[in-house]
Image: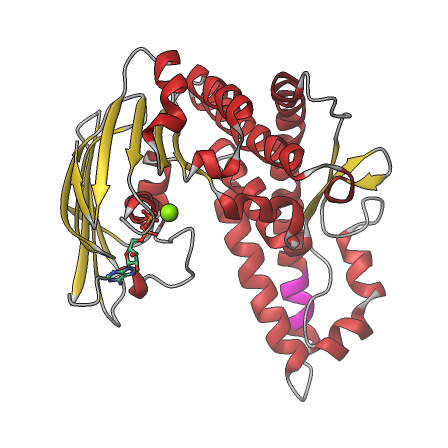
């Protein structure tokens, strides 16, 4: 089971020094607004992926009066993961004391799913957040995906550079196009495999969650980023003039998207805010479920400010579904009483209180 048993933070936002002995199932982190709850979740996300889930840069996470932050964690299987980030320097991460050049191994070891206010970008934001969501699952489940995706991005970058140059080198472009089409085909295939697997699991989860909410069924469709009936080679030829005009590749897997519809209308235009929240929760829970089915392991859920996101009854349903996954959960809230009923559902849990960056538990 992927879970953390120990987390140590040093100079992460307003948390100067903290040590949390985490429960393998449910951890409730409570405290007033601005006390440092989200910062704890942010630290775990940063350690696992190199990114925060609320700011695009890492430096703002370093405490204002410190030069560097450090995050250290131990998994239940005794793997040790650490990250050091100094201002204006790249992060340094280690797995069992060995320096890691990239996040591949750590990300596989710590599969993290976040449920917070920004999760709604999945419905109301641009395609990028939906691609990220899809690719999280594809990365974990389809093991060749990452290499093909990296090749695709390299091809696009080179292709775009050629398209922008004053004298187009057609021979070079043809060579990149060939590699681009090949890698794009593999990326699309992996995404399609994953999406086909994902759909029924999502539908079941969504039905469970929205059962008596009078919610109509939602249909999901995967769009690969170019016409589903035309090979990419042909699409590239057909829109060559456009690509040249914009100096950028207009079609390909970097434009993939997922659509959510109720009947013929976009779900975002039909569902109430509460229903959208359940839909987003169902998407994240389904992802965790597939992960455990395929990998035979569980992921870690970071649920930020649960009561703000869901009302009492739905809060319980979502937590019950999450607990049913046997994943490790870290849930933040202002008032402990707002999740008390959930504490009763789970036989065991650890609670931590945060006050001005100080954590007691
Ligand atoms: N780099 C930083 N150094 C010190 N304090 C910070 C930094 N960044 C944010 N903060 C402060 O840290 C506090 C914790 O924020 P946050 O984790 O979002 O609290 P919560 O989730 O409990 O509402 C906030 O009061 C914020 O002003
Ligand atoms: Mg917060």
Look at 32% across and 35% down and name the residue there.
Answer: 109
Q: Position of residue 258 (x, y in %)?
A: 69, 43
The answer to whether residue 49 is left or right of residue 354 is right
Q: Position of residue 281 (x, y in %)?
A: 55, 31
Residue closest to the eye, 273 or 279: 273
Q: Residue furthest bottom?
A: 166
Residue 88 on the magenta span: no
The answer to whether residue 12 is left or right of residue 149 is left
Look at 57% across and 68% down and name the residue there.
Answer: 157
Task: State which image quarter holds ligand 1.
Answer: bottom left
Judge whether 258 appears above or below 152 on screen: above
Q: Position of residue 117 (x, y in %)?
A: 51, 45
**Residue 187 shows in the view:** yes
The answer to whether residue 79 is left or right of residue 318 is left
**Residue 96 shows in the view:** no
Q: Position of residue 205 (x, y in %)?
A: 60, 20
For the C terminus, the quadrant is: top left
Judge whether 45 appears above or below 212 on screen: below
Look at 62% across and 16% down and name the residue there.
Answer: 208
Residue 167 placement: quadrant: bottom right
- Magenta span covers which residues? 173-177
Judge whether 265 appears above or below 197 on screen: below
Residue closest to the eye, 271 or 334: 334
Q: Main secondary structure of the magenta part?
A: helix
Look at 78% across and 37% down and name the residue there.
Answer: 261
Residue closest to the eye, 1 or 348: 348
């Amino acid at each position: 089971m992927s879970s953390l048993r120990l987390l140590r933070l040093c100079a992460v936002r307003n948390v100067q020094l903290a040590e949390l002995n985490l429960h393998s199932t449910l951890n409730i982190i409570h405290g007033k607004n601005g006390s440092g709850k989200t910062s704890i979740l942010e630290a775990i996300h940063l350690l696992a992926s190199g990114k925060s889930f609320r700011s695009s840069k890492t430096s703002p996470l370093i405490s204002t009066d410190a030069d560097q932050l450090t995050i250290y964690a131990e998994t239940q299987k005794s793997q040790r993961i650490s990250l050091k980030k100094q201002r204006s320097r790249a992060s340094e991460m280690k797995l069992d004391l060995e320096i890691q050049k990239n996040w591949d191994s750590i990300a596989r070891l710590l599969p993290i799913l976040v449920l917070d206010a920004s999760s709604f970008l999945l419905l109301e934001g641009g395609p990028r957040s939906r691609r990220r969501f899809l690719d999280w699952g594809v990365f974990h489940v389809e093991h060749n995906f990452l290499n093909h995706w990296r090749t695709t991005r390299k091809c696009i970058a080179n292709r775009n550079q050629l398209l922008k140059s004053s004298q187009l080198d057609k021979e070079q472009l043809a060579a990149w196009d060939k590699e681009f089409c090949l890698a794009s085909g593999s990326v699309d295939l992996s995404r399609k495999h994953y999406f086909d697997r994902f759909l029924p699991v999502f539908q079941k989860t969504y039905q469970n969650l929205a059962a008596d909410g009078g919610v109509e069924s939602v249909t999901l469709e995967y769009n690969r980023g170019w016409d589903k009936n035309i090979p990419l080679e042909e699409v590239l030829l057909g829109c060559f003039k456009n690509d040249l005009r914009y100096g950028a590749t207009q079609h390909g897997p970097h434009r993939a998207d997922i659509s959510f519809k109720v009947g013929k209308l976009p779900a975002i235009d039909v569902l109430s805010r509460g229903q959208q929240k359940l839909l987003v929760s169902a998407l994240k829970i389904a992802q965790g479920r597939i992960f455990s089915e395929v990998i035979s392991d569980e992921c870690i859920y970071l649920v930020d400010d649960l009561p703000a996101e869901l009302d009492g009854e739905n809060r319980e349903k979502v937590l019950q579904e999450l607990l049913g996954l046997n994943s490790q959960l870290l849930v933040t809230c202002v008032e402990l009483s707002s999740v008390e009923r959930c504490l009763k559902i789970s036989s065991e849990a650890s609670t931590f209180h945060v006050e001005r960056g100080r954590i007691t538990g």
